[in-house]
Every structure is written in C-alpha cells, then in structure tokens.
Image (cartoon, helix red, strand yellow):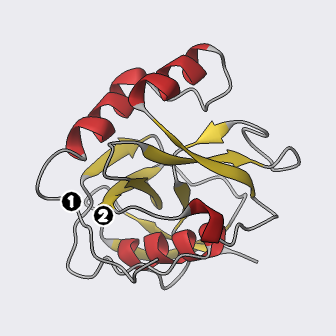
Amino acid sequence: MELWELYDIDRKKTGKIIKRGEKVPDGYYHTVVHVCIFNSKGQMLIQQRQPFKQGWSNLWDVTVGGSAVQGDTSIQAAEREVFEELGLEISLAGMRPALTVSFSFGFDDVYIVVKDVDINRLNLQKEEVQQVKWASREDIMQMIDQKTFISYHKSFINIIFDLQLTKDVHSHFNDY
C-alpha cells in the first residue's frame, strides 16, 4: 500500500497522509516527480507504458515519472523511480528540479539528466514499462499529434528540451 504525504500551498508538510488512489482533499497537495534523461545527441530517453497499466496504457512517456511516497524527498522519489522503472542507479544529490509545475492537486518536480545510457543494459520494470528508446523533440511532437505519446502540452515538451541545453543540468551518476 502506497502512502502519500500531503503538503500545504507553500509546500510545507501538513502531517496528513492518504493512500494512493484516494482523492487529495481541497487545499492539500501531493508531490510527483519526472526524470528526463537526454543523451549527447539531444535525444530524450522515452518509455512505452504497459498495455495493462492503469492510466495512459500503451502510450509513450518521458523517461520516468511517479509519486513521492511517505518519507521520500523529491530527490529520493526521483532516484527511486529511475531505479524501479529502468534499473539504473542515479544520484541527484545537491540538485534542484529544473522545473516545478503546479497542478490542481500537487507539485510536479522535473529533473533533467544528460548522460549517454546504453538502453540494452537497462533492466525494465515489466509491471510498468514495455520498452524504451531515444527520441528527438520532433519525434515526440509527432507522437503527440499521432496520440501515441501522453498528451502533454507541446510547450511543456519544448521547455524540457530547451532546459537540457543549459549548463545547470545534472550529468553525474554511476557509469552505465
């Protein structure tokens, strides 16, 4: 059973906890994380969700995403999700999200990592991930148009691609 800590609008812990699947009460917020891994060619590692996965079944998505669980910091949640879904150990120590998006019931912290990863050496979580591949900005935009990628706003995808070009992204994790 996954438990989520709830925060106030200023992102301070409230002491309230709910079970995954319960509605987040009005005035409370939950933390979600996404990690976008880019290679030296500027391509993003994307994953295809399993057909039996609830929510966006069979669609392609950014590298990894998930919820912070009770006791997780945003960084711990991001590191855990990368390990669970891809079998890849990363350290985001000392890093802040490249972008935080506020949505109706939470905060979505987006971390950007630039590292050439051999996708053939990844250990995909079969319960969540069908396959992975490298994709350009144009590939992802076309997939959104074709409705084979989660229907993020294109401006969101553009911002992520633009941010990976800055010098402030994280590129340190265990060689893979």
- Label number found at residue 169: 1
> Residue 129: x percent and y percent?
73, 56
- The amino acid marked with disc number 1 is Val
Q: Secondary structure at mark 1?
A: loop
- Label number found at residue 11: 2
- The amino acid marked with disc number 2 is Arg
> Residue 75: x percent and y percent?
37, 74
Looking at this view, name the residue that lies furthest to the right: 52
Identified at 57% across, 26% down, the residue is 151
- Nearest the eye: 104 or 116: 116
Residue depth check, mark 2 versus mark 1: number of the one nearer the observer: 1
Identified at 49% across, 81% down, the residue is 89
- Nearest the eye: 44 or 53: 44
> Residue 73: x percent and y percent?
39, 78
Q: Residues within 10 Å of mark 2 (few under 14, many from 20)?
A: some
Tell whether 98 sits left or right of 15: left
Q: Secondary structure at mark 2?
A: loop
Identified at 74% across, 42% down, the residue is 55
Tell whether 106 sits left or right of 40: right
